[in-house]
Image (tube, coloured by chain):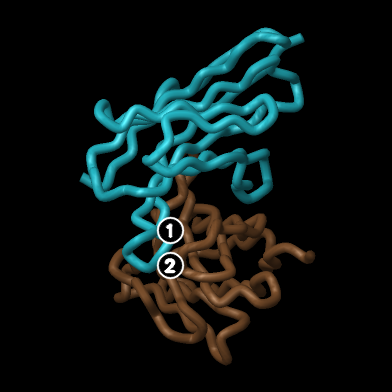
Amino acid sequence: QQQVKQSPQSLIVQKGGISIINCAYENTAFDYFPWYQQFPGKGPALLIAIRPDVSEKKEGRFTISFNKSAKQFSLHIMDSQPGDSATYFCAASIVAGGGNKLTFGTGTQLKVEL
Amino acid sequence: EAGVAQSPRYKIIEKRQSVAFWCNPISGHATLYWYQQILGQGPKLLIQFQNNGVVDDSQLPKDRFSAERLKGVDSTLKIQPAKLEDSAVYLCASSLGPNSPLHFGNGTRLTVT
């Protein structure tokens, strides 16, 4: 019940295109849903996060869409650039429980081609 | 602000040997986490500290792994004895408080041969 399922495992997008990564969860107690970006040899870096009381959050070219009833959330990267090529992880946690203990998805390797 | 510092960056040991990793969190961050990231997988929480106390170590293999955070700042994670399946990147993260976003270090890549 603590799992977060992420798809696809890998994704190739043309420069300027839209990258879409999907995640699904089971535990309805999760109340914080961040996305992390990880480059080779680096630690994950927080990209954008959402709480379940909103259905969408946008920061620059990055948008999270959240569907509470379906227990799904997704990351959209608009106007994808070669510099966006990285591994993306969705995650979920129960912040209200007194600790931001993240459960991560398995990751999506994104490659943006020229 | 300076990020989360970890050392060493790489470590290669033989199975049954011991190894220790060090983490210095962002100044003022009370909460510290250790995660294990096996190649091709997402990070998995091992232990969470709040100041120098353990909040959650339910996923820490306590027969071989130990961690401490003396004085509520730096932390060390030790494995003794190491197994082949411990080969992974060990990530340290810190946050201002238990409900704040996590900031990760660049990790220590451990190879057990």
Give left or right: position of A59 versus B91: right
**Residue A93 on image: x %, y %:** 37, 52
Estimate the x, y position of residue A21 in percent, counting from the top left.
48, 23
Name the image quarter holding the N terminus of chain A: top left
At a point 68% along the width and 70% down the height, the residue shown is: B26
Location of residue B75 by image quarter: bottom right
The circle on residue B27 is none
Rendered-image quadrant of the C terminus of chain A: top right
Q: Amino acid at mark 1?
A: Asp
Using residue B85 as the reference point, say whether residue A38 is left or right of it: right
Foreground residue among B99 and A42:
B99
Q: Residue furthest left?
A: A1
For the colour cyan, the matching chain is A
Q: Position of residue A91 (x, y in %)?
A: 43, 43
Residue at horizontal 48 percent and vertical 41 percent from the top: A50
For the point 66% across and 74% down, the residue is B24
Q: Is residue B54 left or right of residue B34?
A: left
Reading the image, the residue beneath label 2 is B82
**How many marks can you see?**
2
x, y percentage for residue A62? 62, 28
Q: Is residue B6 above or below residue A75?
A: below
Nearest to the observer: residue B58 or residue A101: A101
Q: Please name the residue that numbered disc 1 is placed on.
A: B86
**Above or below A64: residue B104:** below
Determine the residue located farthest toward the front in the rendered image.
A53
Amino acid marked by disc 2: Ala
Q: Are marks 1 and 2 in contact (CB under 8 Å)?
A: yes
Q: Secondary structure at mark 1?
A: helix
Chain B palette colour: brown
Q: Spatial distance from mark 1 to mark 2, Cα to Cα?
A: 6 Å
At numbered mark 2, what does the secondary structure look like: helix, strand or loop? Answer: loop
